[in-house]
Amino acid sequence: MSWYEDLSLWSGFSDVLFSAERARHAADLVATSPLLAFPPGSRVLDQCCGVGFFSAPLARRGHRVTGVDIHRELLERAEAESEGSFVRADVREYVSPDAFDVVLNMYTSFGYFDEHDDNVQVLRNAYRSLVPGGELIVDLLSKEIYASWVGPPKIVDVPGGMVVMRDTILDDWTRYRTDWTLVRGNTAEHTALTCWVYSAAELKDMFSRAGFEKVQCFGNFDGGPYDGEATRLIVRGTRA
């Protein structure tokens, strides 16, 4: 079983992954970001939607949202917060041809799969699911940003304890491994995940291979440039 299929990661570390602060941040981005200002009533596919941090505020703004995730338990939480529809499926396989105006893949939910071609397939599925002129937006922690961020272990406070995070670069900067240890009182719980880490140039090439045109990179959700001040890599491409 791959790490992303293990529900204990998502449930055991939910205080970090699905915190109220992250939910508020997602709602703020939907309300203020020009990159997320879609025409009223847009049909939006949220790949790897999790508990619906983006699905819920998008639905509240009147968009018709479909969230896709492999974990039923996370989808049930999303359904409780949103009027969108939710589908249990693997994003390597889920395609709804010509059904959406926008496809989103947020919070570094891209690059999970062991095979690089499987990650490209996620982009191809997004392309096929979009109408002509539709947009795909992928938000992640890029290779360039990760290089300035990785280093000593980091500590994140959670209710009643803390999470210690330690990162390791693998395969000549192809992938990274993150080890998390949750400490509460006298107990400790450990998990690890491994992802591909892509540069802006690599991801732009992957978008083009999947068929997208007008591929652009942004360094934040204000639409700022992807430069030395960037805090995220946000890539947007259009189906021809």
Image: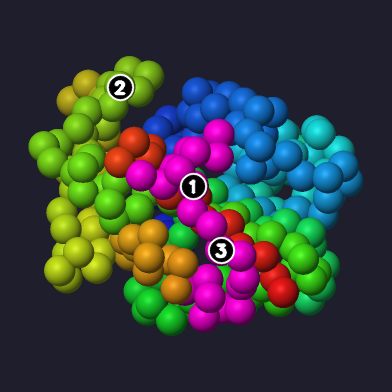
Q: Quadrant of the C terminus?
A: bottom right
Q: Nearer the viewer, residue 73 or 62?
A: 62
> Which picture quadrant has residue 194?
bottom left
- Vertical relation: 22 (above or below) 166: above
Q: Secondary structure at mark 2?
A: strand
User: What is the x, y in percent for residue 28?
Assistant: 62, 26
Amino acid at the residue labelled 3: Val
Residue 201 appearing in the image: yes
Q: Residues within 10 Å of mark 1 (few under 14, many from 20)?
A: many
Residue occupied by mark 1: 218
User: What is the x, y in percent for residue 3?
Assistant: 36, 61
Q: Choose the circle earlier in sequence order: 3 or 2.
A: 2
Q: Is residue 209 magenta?
A: yes
Residue at the spot 37% in from the left edge and 19% down from the top edge: 159
Q: Residues within 10 Å of mark 2 (few under 14, many from 20)?
A: few
Q: How many angstroms separate mark 3 from mark 1 (CA)?
A: 10 Å
Q: Nearer the viewer, residue 13 or 45?
A: 45
Residue occupied by mark 3: 215
- Vertical relation: 160 (above or below) 193: above
User: What is the x, y in percent for residue 76?
Assistant: 68, 46
Q: How many angstroms separate mark 3 from mark 2 (CA)?
A: 38 Å
Q: How many angstroms separate mark 2 from mark 1 (CA)?
A: 30 Å
Of the two numbered discs 2 and 1 in the rendering, the one whose residue sits closer to the viewer: 1
Q: Choose the circle earlier in sequence order: 2 or 1.
A: 2
Amino acid at the residue labelled 2: Asp
User: What is the x, y in percent for residue 48?
Assistant: 57, 56
Residue at the spot 37% in from the left edge and 69% down from the top edge: 202
> Which picture quadrant has residue 136?
bottom right
Amino acid at the residue labelled 1: Phe
Q: Which mark is residue 157?
A: 2
- Vertical relation: 128 (above or below) 73: below
